[in-house]
């Protein structure tokens, strides 16, 4: 999954050398890697949430590049281009860096993580942009687009630019079982981890009626929670809502939903549900 996302990003950015250079610089940045590791530690180990680390950054980064490609192919104009701050290469750079750094603030806490993500990303963005752009005014303007995207990715407040909309929607596409399995294995048994295990794949492609179609394939109907509460909300509250459609479906097969859990029970001392490791004897 990690390797596939990395290859997907590199291949998609071949026509955009500045964006590709920025991706390589970010991937090798030790500060960024430390942010991803600690964001993941807090969200998964301390809060019992799904993956919010480097893998999430890569998967959503790959999705953001794909979504922007489809939007541009349909004639949509990124705000970076509309504002004359940069060209398409710059727009891809903005979207990719924004998306890959949007969750690093979780290392401080989940609450207000958008603000922390924007703040913590500034030295990384400055370091990368300084190696690519000679004009300090353009560096500041491009960084502004990225900070807006990072700050609004969780829809409070709502994103205003096309690039921010892409970041938000790309974040919403990482809802597959690979992300939920980690939290589930650590004992987080809730609708978030269970519904994530119910989603097998998310495909992003050109739609018949919209420039972007996001198809969600589920092995269990519990996955509809992820579609409604995570992905669909991101789409409907983004500036690209009219350009994106979402389709959720279960695969044809045995005729029934796959079992995700057998039984859960309320923990005796903690207000949370946990899996029964062994069948309990009848009273």
Image (cartoon, rainbow, N blue to C red):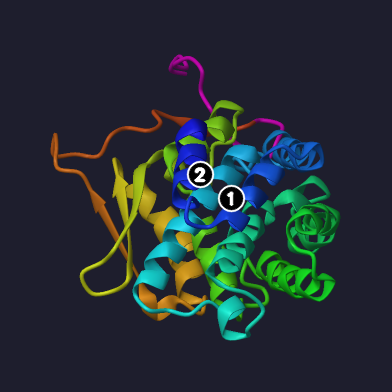
Q: Which residues are magenta?
A: 268-283
- Name the residue at 50% across, 52% down: 13
**Percent position (x, y) of residue 183?**
58, 34
Provide the secondary structure element on which disc 1 rests.
Answer: helix
Q: Closest to the observer: 172 or 57?
A: 57
Q: Closest to the observer: 148 or 190?
A: 148
Give the answer, above or below, for where 54 lies relative to 100.
above
Q: Is residue 155 magenta?
A: no
From the viewer's perspective, is 237 left or right of 120? Answer: left
Q: Closest to the observer: 252 or 258?
A: 252
Q: Which residue is mark 2?
A: 10
Q: Which residue is mark 1?
A: 20
**Percent position (x, y) of residue 128?**
76, 53
**Percent position (x, y) of residue 199?**
37, 44
- Name the residue at 49% across, 31% down: 3
From the viewer's perspective, is 24 left or right of 228? Answer: right
> Counting other residues with Cα less than 10 Å from the Cα at mark 2, is it few (<14), some (14-19), or many (20 or more)?
some
Residue 248 can be seen in this image: yes
Instruction: Give residue 257's quadrant in the image.
Output: top left
The CA distance from mark 2 to mark 1 is: 7 Å
């Amino acid at each position: 999954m990690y390797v596939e996302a990395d290859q997907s990003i590199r291949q998609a950015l071949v026509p955009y050398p500045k964006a590709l250079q920025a991706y390589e610089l970010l991937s090798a940045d030790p500060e960024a890697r430390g942010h991803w590791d600690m964001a993941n530690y807090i969200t998964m180990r301390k809060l019992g949430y799904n993956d919010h680390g480097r893998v999430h950054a890569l998967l959503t980064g790959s999705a953001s590049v794909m979504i922007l490609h489809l939007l541009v192919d349909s004639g949509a104009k990124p705000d970076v281009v509309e504002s004359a701050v940069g060209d398409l290469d710059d727009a891809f750079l903005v979207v990719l860096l924004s998306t890959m750094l949007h969750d690093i603030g979780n290392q401080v806490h989940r609450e207000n993580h958008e603000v922390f993500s924007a703040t913590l990303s500034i030295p990384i963005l400055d370091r990368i942009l300084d190696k690519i752009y000679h004009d300090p005014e353009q560096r500041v303007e491009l960084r502004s687009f990225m900070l807006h995207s990072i700050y609004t990715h969780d829809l409070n407040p709502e994103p205003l630019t096309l690039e921010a909309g892409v970041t938000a929607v790309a974040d919403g596409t990482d809802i597959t079982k690979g992300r939920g399995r980690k939290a589930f294995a650590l004992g987080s048994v809730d609708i978030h981890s269970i519904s994530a295990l119910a989603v097998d794949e998310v495909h992003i492609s050109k739609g018949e009626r919209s420039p972007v179609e996001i198809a969600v394939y589920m092995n269990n109907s519990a996955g509809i929670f992820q579609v409604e509460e995570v992905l669909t909300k991101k789409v409907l509250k983004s500036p690209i809502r009219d350009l994106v459609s979402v389709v959720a479906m279960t695969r044809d097969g045995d005729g029934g939903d796959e079992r995700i859990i057998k039984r859960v029970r309320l923990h005796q001392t903690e207000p949370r549900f946990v899996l029964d490791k062994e069948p309990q004897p009848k009273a």
